Amino acid sequence: MIELRPFASLGHANHGWLDANHHFSFANYYDPQRTHWGDLRVWNDDTIAAGTGFGKHPHKNMEIITYVREGAITHEDSLGNKGRTEAGDVQVMSAGTGVFHSEHNLEDTTTRLFQIWILPNRNGHAPSWGTRSFPKGERSNQFTILASGFEQDTDALRIHADARVIGATIRKGETIEYPLGEQRLGYLVPATGSVEIEGTHVQTRDGAAISQTKILKVRALEDAEVVLVDTAYNV
């Protein structure tokens, strides 16, 4: 079953330096029908102006995954971590018992990214941060696990959650599959292009909330880059 959430229906806040679109209730945007999807709590579609960013602020007990679509983001935190993540790559921050961090676009061009928050499998994990490259060519016409809470996913960034964050690039006319399972939930957003899922057309930056789907089949209506979260079926 697919519930389409068109981009135009998302929450929106333009702060000048930050143009943010919210798939789920966040900050001043509240929709009682869109507070979470299983353990997926936040999916923000952010555009960050050059030379700006989020100043140092705290988080606790949340798994925060950043998927950079264009440009780059530079991270710094109270654990002493500092690093730059560029387009197509992923960073994860396990806020755990508490961490302060900043995220800045130090480039001279706009940065566009998805920021995804997933509830942890328990409170009180030690905070941590990591980033790695996922070349798009290696994701061609197949789903690649980018971040995971499952030990068998050894090539993925580690998160403390009953969830996976997955990416793929799909050529026009091709169909790829993912074994979601009827007891799991999926949330898919095309970063570029458009796809068809169970007869539903999902355009660039739309959200597709997926349930009761044993095998997820995604067909590209045009060349597409998609991000998928596979999450526990929690309420």
Image (cartoon, rainbow, N blue to C red):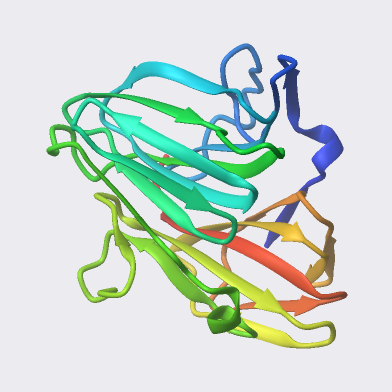
Mark yes or no: residue 233 visible.
Answer: no
Judged left or right of residue 2, residue 62 is left
Percent x, y for residue 182?
49, 69
Percent x, y for residue 31?
66, 22
Query: Relative to 55, does residue 217 appear above or below in the rendering?
Result: below
Percent x, y for residue 70?
67, 51
* Image quarter of the C terminus: top left
Mark yes or no: residue 102 visible.
Answer: yes
Determine the residue positioned at 20% across, 69% down.
151
Q: Quadrant of residue 11?
A: top right
In depth, the one of 221 and 3 nearer the eye is: 221
Query: Relative to 13, does residue 210 appear above or below in the rendering?
Result: below
Determine the residue positioned at 23% across, 45% down.
121
Determine the residue positioned at 73% across, 19% down.
13
* Image quarter of the N terminus: bottom right
Judged left or right of residue 206, residue 229 is left
Query: Relative to 101, does residue 119 appear above or below in the rendering?
Result: below
Judged left or right of residue 26, residue 99 is left
In depth, the one of 129 and 189 nearer the eye is: 129
